[in-house]
Image (cartoon, grey):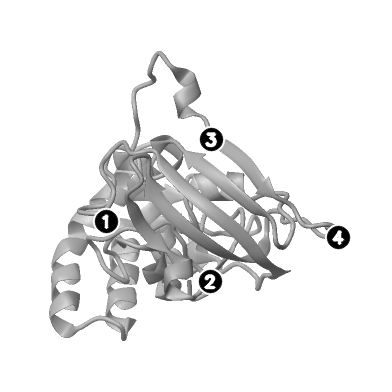
Amino acid sequence: MNASCSLASVAYSEMNSCYRVHATMSRFQGITLVTCWILLVLTTLTGQSVATENEQSNKLKVDVISVPEGCEQKSKDGDQVTMHYTGSLVDGTKFDSSWDREQPFTFQLGVGQVIKGWDQGLLNMCVGEKRKLTIPPELGYGDSGVKNVIPGGATLIFDVELINIGNAPPTTNVFKEIDDDQDNQLSREEVSEYLKKQIAGDQSEESSEKVQMLAEHDKLVEEIFQHEDKDKNGYISHEEFSGPKHDEL
């Protein structure tokens, strides 16, 4: 994920590479941290569900399939982990697999680079350990799903194996990068300009796709403010900002 994104890493598919929701986790490998933040914001915004009578169905289920002997290190928040995985729906429909591509997936655990079901379900794993994660929509892609790939409200099944645990590079302070005038709050203009720069600088997109993303980005800015601007004063404060940031200003 540019060693930065995930989907379950987080995977979305309508706003490709920069601000389009990716349909498979493998596509997240080239997305920036700010993209991950945007995708997670949109998932939270569109994926809020009304509580059901069966609250058990809303909980993450972790089944440990196998654990190697002599586990000396376990995964924790902040680690850079490398995983193999297969993602499927409850009916058995497979939507993505790193094993099929013969390319494991690397991301930083516990910092919002992947869906919440992964951040929570991959903690305290040993290298070589295998697990089965049953992730409710609240911890996955919510009611919106992923267009043509994952239905809205879908429970996700991930068979995962931890390949490696490494030291992660320092997390980028996205808030500071967006806050151009350094007044410790983000205006619509600052967010808008930052998104435009990210789209323009993404070399993986064709010019026609960039034009489309630029045309859609005003709507995206409003959706971000709808979720992030909690006090509705027209600015996103450091406290309100849910993306990657350092505690110090």
Q: CA distance from mark 1 to mark 4?
A: 45 Å
Q: Secondary structure at mark 4?
A: loop
Residue at 81% x, 60% y is 73
Residue at 71% x, 53% y is 125
Q: Earlier in the sequence, mark 2 or mark 3?
A: 3
Q: Amino acid at mark 3?
A: Leu
Q: Earlier in the sequence, mark 2 or mark 1?
A: 2
The residue where tag 2 is placed is: 104
Q: Amino acid at mark 2?
A: Pro
Q: Amino acid at mark 1?
A: Val
Residue 37 seen in the figure:
yes
Few, some or many residues within 10 Å of mark 3 (<14, 14–19, 20+)? many
Q: Secondary structure at mark 1?
A: helix
Image vertical order of residue 63 relative to residue 38, above or below: above
The percent position of residue 114, horizontal first and vertical second, equals: 49, 56
Q: Secondary structure at mark 2?
A: loop
Q: CA distance from mark 4 to mark 2?
A: 22 Å
On-image quarter of the C terminus:
bottom right
The percent position of residue 208, horizontal first and vertical second, equals: 12, 80
Image vertical order of residue 227 relative to residue 78, above or below: above
Q: Earlier in the sequence, mark 4 or mark 3?
A: 3
Q: Quadrant of residue 152?
A: top left
Nearer to us: label 1 or label 4: 4
Decide if residue 103 is on the left or right side of residue 170.
Answer: left
Residue at 30% x, 57% y is 188
The residue where tag 1 is placed is: 221
Q: CA distance from mark 4 to mark 3?
A: 26 Å
The residue where tag 3 is placed is: 60
Q: Amino acid at mark 4?
A: Glu
Decide if residue 151 is on the left or right side of residue 67.
Answer: left
The residue where tag 4 is placed is: 72
